[in-house]
Image (cartoon, helix red, strand yellow):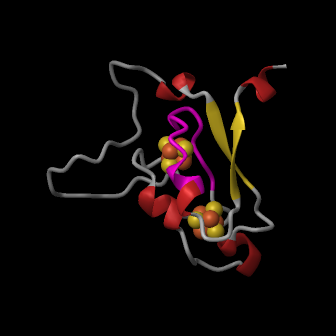
């Protein structure tokens, strides 16, 4: 989901089960998308995708609707910060554990 192909050596990481396992388990807050505010879903066309572009772990899909692979999302909040429509809210993980 959302993996960007790159033929060059660079510092970008990508999702996958490495020595650290499913790294989403480290997360203290998760990004939640309000699709009523998200441009691709609202307009039903490929648009924006800034969250996909800036996610350092490439766990956001470039699809309609946009989806986040929470198994590997580390909760860095970059997607929420770059979203121009404020469609992504960081929610404390404790709210999902009860
Ligand atoms: S919180 Fe960070 S790792 Fe998770 S989807 Fe957003 S940008 Fe990617
Ligand atoms: S940056 Fe925001 S508006 Fe743009 S695709 Fe991502 S969630 Fe939707």
Quadrant showing the C terminus: top right
Q: Is residue 6 visible?
A: yes
Q: Nearer the viewer, residue 82 or 4?
A: 82
The dominant secondary structure in magenta is: loop
Magenta stretch in the rendered image: 67-80
x, y percent for residue 43: 72, 81
Would residue 31 be found to the left or right of residue 4 on screen?
right
Give the residue at the far right of this rendering.
Answer: 98
User: Can residue 61 be spotted in the picture?
Assistant: no
Q: Position of residue 78 (x, y in %)?
A: 50, 51
Where is residue 72? Give x, y as percent.
Answer: 50, 34
**Which residue is rendered at x = 43% and y = 20% of the image?**
21
Occupied quadrant, residue 75: top right
User: Looking at the image, is 69 positioned above or below residue 88?
Assistant: above
Residue 18 shown in magenta: no
Above or below: residue 50 compared with residue 69: below
Image quadrant where residue 7 sits: bottom left
Q: Position of residue 12 (x, y in %)?
A: 29, 48
Direction front: furthest residue:
81
**Residue sitting at x 38%, y 19%:** 20
Q: Residue at x 34, y 25 (%)?
A: 18
Residue 79 colored in magenta in the image: yes
């Amino acid at each position: 989901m959302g993996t960007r192909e790159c033929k060059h050596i660079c510092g970008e990481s990508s999702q996958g089960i490495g020595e650290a396992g499913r790294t989403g388990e480290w997360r203290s807050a998760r990004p939640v998308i309000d699709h009523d505010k998200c441009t691709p879903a609202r307009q039903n066309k490929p648009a924006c995708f800034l969250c996909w572009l800036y996610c350092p772990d490439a766990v956001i899909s470039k699809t309609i609707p946009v989806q986040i692979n929470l198994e590997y999302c580390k909760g860095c909040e970059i997607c929420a910060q770059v979203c121009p429509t404020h469609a992504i809210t960081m929610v404390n993980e404790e709210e999902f554990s009860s």
